Image (spheres, rainbow, N blue to C red):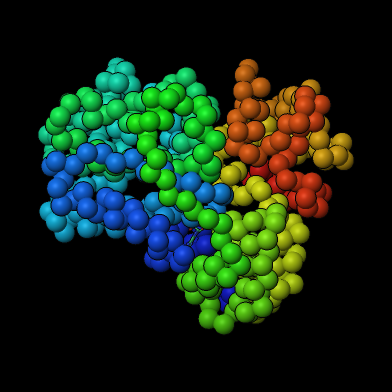
Amino acid sequence: MFKSHIFKDKNKLSPYYVPKRLPHREKQINMLLSIYGDMLKNIWSAYPRFIQIVGAAGTGKTCTALKFGEIIVDMARREGINLKHIYMNCKVDGATRYVLFSNLVRKVTQKISTKSLSPEEMIRQLIDYLRFEETFLIITFDEIDYFVQMNPRERVIYDLTRMPEIYPGEPIPVIGEIFIARSLKWHDLLEPGEKSTLGIGIIEFPRYTSGQIRDILEDRVEEAFQPGVVLDETLDLISDITANPPVNGDARIGLEILYYSGVLAENLGSSRVLPEHVRRVYSEINPTITTEDIMSLDKNGRLILLALVRGLKANKSAYISLRDLRRFYGIVCEEYDVKPVENFEEHVQDLIYRGIIDMKSLMEIGISGATLVDLERFLDNLLRQLES
Ligand SMILES: Nc1ncnc2c1ncn2[C@@H]1O[C@H](COP(=O)(O)OP(=O)(O)OP(=O)(O)O)[C@@H](O)[C@H]1O
Ligand SMILES: [Mg+2]
């Protein structure tokens, strides 16, 4: 078997891996633990608490919520309480309220069939089920801003925060809901009633500084790389790039640079990961679109993005018109032998909401942040990822 001289375990650099320790997020985890940990003492008379987590991209919101979930479930187990943490990512689990709620139910139990149920009935049956099973839930709704933007009229916050009113005065098995967003802008789309039940419990996630990024990366280097392979200077450089504009402290990008620098070092037959590898990788990746962003797109989204990249390359420009984009999309669909979507504009809108593409006007559609770096190289790289 091939034994890497660079990597010990590449998986430890995956965006989906939650490491054992989350340096510089101890305070946030402890806040969550103090809020929900107290409720365990009196779980039968607990009222649900809603908490919002707010912070920029890559500030550790998702991994902190997941880590907190692990810890609190464990604490509950030791008290003899059956508590589950359910993680919902609205970008993945919920195109509409109907889909979101049926996925929520499905993650809790296979015993409820949601097929002919309305969203309201799903929630009621879920509550009945939990009461019967004496099971409690904390639910995290990640990227809630995306959901509310996409479905401003579905009033999902209303449903989610009014669960206690289904059985007024009785204990409610959903003891907590955590809503994660990049900013508070989504509040503008809420009704006053929704805003008030949501409350003002907000935990902020500041951007990481260079030193903090370094601590985070150091842990990962130990888990993912062979000893002594990543030089101190290399880590310093990645931390500085990551902490400064345009990346602005996004740990995901720091990890991605670390990963690709390792891959490059390996491919070049180097026995160390050097600053020059970092520089080369950095000039090729775009600081705003990550592999994770691309992974989260469905087929149509990817094809439209591919069409955009082709169009930008063909025009040798940072922008193309919506009409050109549609034309390139038609060509790409033919090439991949798929039927073009009818609601093309909606799919483009989705890519805009996701922050992947930018639309200044109907004549100017481009890739977010792509003017910041060497566009040609970046597009080639993106093309490789999309085509594979
Ligand atoms: N304090 C930390 N310690 C270790 N790893 C971290 C820390 N903060 C973030 N990471 C890692 O950085 C990556 C991005 O973190 P995460 O996905 O939690 O960010 P986020 O705030 O949810 O970003 P987004 O708004 O884009 O969803 C993940 O791979 C995560 O494991
Ligand atoms: Mg996240």
Residue 270 lies left or right of residue 95; in this view the side is: right
- Horizontal and vertical percent position of residue 388: 64, 46
- Horizontal and vertical percent position of residue 231: 63, 79
Residue 267 lies left or right of residue 72; in this view the side is: right
User: As displayed, is residue 39 above or below residue 4?
Assistant: above
Number of marks = 0
Q: Along the line of sight, which residue is nearer the eye, 264 or 211?
A: 211
Q: Name which residue lies at 51% across and 39% down.
A: 184
Q: Name which residue lies at 49% across and 29% down.
A: 148
- Horizontal and vertical percent position of residue 260: 64, 63
Which residue is most to the right? 316
Q: Along the line of sight, which residue is nearer the eye, 161 or 341?
A: 161
Which residue is most to the bottom? 228
Q: Quadrant of residue 116?
A: top left
Is residue 230 visible to us here?
yes
Is residue 263 visible to us here?
no
Q: Quadrant of residue 254?
A: bottom right
Q: Name which residue lies at 64% across and 33% down.
A: 352
- Horizontal and vertical percent position of residue 63: 44, 54
Q: Name which residue lies at 17% across and 26% down.
A: 167
User: As displayed, is residue 199 above or below residue 33?
Assistant: above
Residue 127 lies left or right of residue 276; in this view the side is: left
Q: Along the line of sight, which residue is nearer the eye, 215 or 330?
A: 215
User: As displayed, is residue 301 above or below residue 182?
Assistant: above
Q: Quadrant of residue 117?
A: top left
